[in-house]
Image (tube, rainbow, N blue to C red):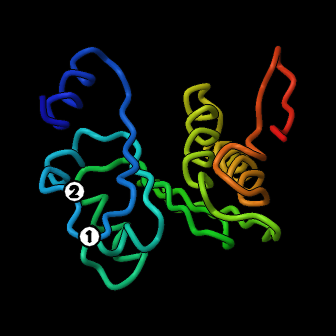
Amino acid sequence: MRLPDIFRRARRLGLSTSLDTNWDPREEWSSTLPELFPLTDIFMPNEQEAMLISRCGSVEAALEWYRQAGVPLVVLKRGDKGASVSSEEGTLHMPVQPVTGGDSVGTGDSFDAGFLAGWLRDLPLSQCLEIGCRCGRAVAGATGGLKGQPVSVRGRTTINN
């Protein structure tokens, strides 16, 4: 089954969809992406991916390109500059304090998980961005993809050490 078919089925079932493409070393990405965008509720690239996939020369042009492609919500991971979320209502930006002593392994995935956890709870987009940035920053300050990851046990959040 192709990914667009899975997204169409999710839509028919009333489910939401989110997409983070991951980096393509050949910078070609999937030929089915244009078919996926109108079926995607939230697209979550980093800045480079956003510009390369859209073939736009700026983040602003890429955001407009994704809106035209039918993506209602684009969440941009901007590394040590934080993150942004763009919708038809406008763009919100959440800065972060840079961290040292870790690597970036798993940072984007942890950001995505945090943002989506807030979004699935119908929290305001600004709060979803804050949760995502906190999760990503916690992982960026540690080495490896799991160390530093926030873990919630019985409603209490701790940092995985």
Q: Secondary structure at mark 1?
A: helix
Q: Are marks 1 and 2 in contact (CB under 8 Å)?
A: yes
Q: Residue at x 55, y 27 (%)?
A: 120
Q: Nearer the viewer, residue 75 or 126?
A: 75
In this figure, which residue is indicated by the disc labeled 2? 69
Tell which circle, 1 or 2, labels the residue nearer the N-terminal end: 1
Of 38 and 31, nearer the camera is 31
Residue 53 x, y percent position in the rendering: 27, 68
| Quadrant where the C terminus is found in the figure | top right
Q: CA distance from mark 1 to mark 2?
A: 10 Å
- Looking at the rendered structure, the secondary structure element under dot 2 is loop
**In this picture, is 157 found above or below 86?**
above
Q: Position of residue 149 (x, y in %)?
A: 73, 42
The amino acid beneath tag 2 is Ala
Q: Is residue 141 left or right of residue 127?
A: right
Q: Can the viewer see residue 129 in this picture?
A: no
Residue 7 in percent (x, y) is at: 23, 31
Residue 38: image tag? none
Identity, as a three-letter code, of the amino acid under mark 1: Ser
Residue to which mark 1 is pinned: 54
Q: What quarter of the picture does the N terminus occupy?
A: top left
Q: Is residue 17 toward the left or the right of residue 70 in the image?
A: right
Rendered image quadrant of residue 124: top right
Count numbered badges in the picture.
Answer: 2
Q: Residue at x 78, y 25 (%)?
A: 152
Image quadrant in which you'd find residue 63: bottom left
| Spot occupied by residue 91 in the image (x, y as percentages of width and height) | 53, 62
Left of 117 or right of it: where is 27?
Answer: left
